[in-house]
Image (spheres, grey):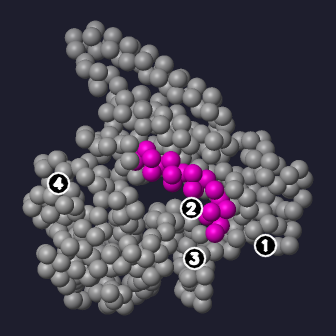
């Protein structure tokens, strides 16, 4: 589906004005219909109609970066507390992947590569093979035979990040789509920071090269090489990788599934404890599997975060305290990481200890851990609900820790999908304090 992306702040603000006008008209019409039927609808009944939810999704789909990033951040710690209307809205945004019309796409390429850019290619596929929050990906063949995947940023995204995030926050607040008591300010600030980073494709190119350096010589993993002469802040040209979606492993032999999950877990622990660079977006589409070579291919390094040595040491201390230590050891380590602070009540401390022990349960298992037949996510969700809803504790751990939650949750979901059985404890032993 092609739809022109509004490329100026004024045009994007106009979209929000049209949205407000359309919703107001819908509320009047819906209210009149219900009154005729003898009902007395409340404001929320008139706001949260299917028609209005579609209107919101359609408008926010044209500001995908801001809407998707903010929803993503909010769900990192409140995934089980998000109102169903917001969950439905985020699902619509994931599905409504509008692509730039060809003329607009050509204009972006010309502004970055200059006129006559097409002469470098034997073929350029104008239909995108993927659409992300701030750009879309195209396949292209250079005249020298190299096949590339080219990520092209939506026009106007970078200039409008701050205003887009504020506008999306206003919409979510207006429709009461945020968890009660949530301080949305920290999420608005982080969404802006993340989007500004992700909108700099030179930064992502550097992240790719950092991962390549760390994985140099590891034949199990493939990282796409960057074509530097075609890469700018708005266009990222990379080697095209032709693996299959990682979920395709679900149909393959159990030993291969277990081996692949084992490698991904090993790499993830190295990212956190050894390298200090973590790819925090565990979306399944960022993993491919090349059946012929048996190698895992990793994509999309826009959400890479750096972790300082002192925090990595504190995380490792906490990891081992949860595996082998007593409650006092966990409390001490959790304070160093930022999960707990001075004056936290005992019941909150106990809930955090329980959550951390749950999260590290696979590493305490004396044999292989069966991810497919574990109810761990449900047990963790119950504790979160207890903390946030019953006890009303809304203080969050530091944002960099929430991103690790996202990484861990994504890997757990993938291992469950692959029905993997992994000796997590054995892998954990390679990371000593």
Asked if the magenta segment contains residue 18, the reply would be no
Please tell me which of labels 3 and 1 falls first in the chain: 1
Callouts 3 and 1 close, C-beta under 8 Å: no
How far, Cα to Cα, is label 1 from label 2?
23 Å
Picture coordinates of residue 326 (x, y %)?
13, 80
Labelled disc at residue 387: 4
Q: Which residues are magenta?
A: 187-206
Please tell me which of labels 3 and 2 falls first in the chain: 3
Labelled disc at residue 211: 3
Please tell me which of labels 3 and 4 falls first in the chain: 3
Picture coordinates of residue 132 (x, y %)?
57, 53
How far, Cα to Cα, is label 2 from label 4?
32 Å
Q: Residue furthest left?
A: 346
How far, Cα to Cα, is label 3 from label 4?
37 Å
Is any part of residue 90 visible from this angle? no
Residue at the disc numbered 2: 302
How far, Cα to Cα, is label 3 from label 1?
22 Å
Crowding near pointer 1: few (<14 within 10 Å), some, many (20+)? few
**Which of these two is toward me, 185 or 301?**
185
Secondary structure under tag 2 reads loop
Callouts 1 and 4 close, C-beta under 8 Å: no
Is any part of residue 24 visible from this angle? yes
Q: Residue at x 82, y 55 (%)?
A: 113
> Which quadrant would the N terminus be assigned to in this image?
top right
Secondary structure under tag 3 reads helix
Q: Residue at x 82, y 61 (%)?
A: 123
Picture coordinates of residue 388 (x, y %)?
20, 50
Instruction: Find residue 125 and report its image quarter.
Output: bottom right
How far, Cα to Cα, is label 3 from label 2?
12 Å
Callouts 3 and 4 close, C-beta under 8 Å: no
> Is 274 positioned to the left or the right of 120 in the image?
left
């Amino acid at each position: 589906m092609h739809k022109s992306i509004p490329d100026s702040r004024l045009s994007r603000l106009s979209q929000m004005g049209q949205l407000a006008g359309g919703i107001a008209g819908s509320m009047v019409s819906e209210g009149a219909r219900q009154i005729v039927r003898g009902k007395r609808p409340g404001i929320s009944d008139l706001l949260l109609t299917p028609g209005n939810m579609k209107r919101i999704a359609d408008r926010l789909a044209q500001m995908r970066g801001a809407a998707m990033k903010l929803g993503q951040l909010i769900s990192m710690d409140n995934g089980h507390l998000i109102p169903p209307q917001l969950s439905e809205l985020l699902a619509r945004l994931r599905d409504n992947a509008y692509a730039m019309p060809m003329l607009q796409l050509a204009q972006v390429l010309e502004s970055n590569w200059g006129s006559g850019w097409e002469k470098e290619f034997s073929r350029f596929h104008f239909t995108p093979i993927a659409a992300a929050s701030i750009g879309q990906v195209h396949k292209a063949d250079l005249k020298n035979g190299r096949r590339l995947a080219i990520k092209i940023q939506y026009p106007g995204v970078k200039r409008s990040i701050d205003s887009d995030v504020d506008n999306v926050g206003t919409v979510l607040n207006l429709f009461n789509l945020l968890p009660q008591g949530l301080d949305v300010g920290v999420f608005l600030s982080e969404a802006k920071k993340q989007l500004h980073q992700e909108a700099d494709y030179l930064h992502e190119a550097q992240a790719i090269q950092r991962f390549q350096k760390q994985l140099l010589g590891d034949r199990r993993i493939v990282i796409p090489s960057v074509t530097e002469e075609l890469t700018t802040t708005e266009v990222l040209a990379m080697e095209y990788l032709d693996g299959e979606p990682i979920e395709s492993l679900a149909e393959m032999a159990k030993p291969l599934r277990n081996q692949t999950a084992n490698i991904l877990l090993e790499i993830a622990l190295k990212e956190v404890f050894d390298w200090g660079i973590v790819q925090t977006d565990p979306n399944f589409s960022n993993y491919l599997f090349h059946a012929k070579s048996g190698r895992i291919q990793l994509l999309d390094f826009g959400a890479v975060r750096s972790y300082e040595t002192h925090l990595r040491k504190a995380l490792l201390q906490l990891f081992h305290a949860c595996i082998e230590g007593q409650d006092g050891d966990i409390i001490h380590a959790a304070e160093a990481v930022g999960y707990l602070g001075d004056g936290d009540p005992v019941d909150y401390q106990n809930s955090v200890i329980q959550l951390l022990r749950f999260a590290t349960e696979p590493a305490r298992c004396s044999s292989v851990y069966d991810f497919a037949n574990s109810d761990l996510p449900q047990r963790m969700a119950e504790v979160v609900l207890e903390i946030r809803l019953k006890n009303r504790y809304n203080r969050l751990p530091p944002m960099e820790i929430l991103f690790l939650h996202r990484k861990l949750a994504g890997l757990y979901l993938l291992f469950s999908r692959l029905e993997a059985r992994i000796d997590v404890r054995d892998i954990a032993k390679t990371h000593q304090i």
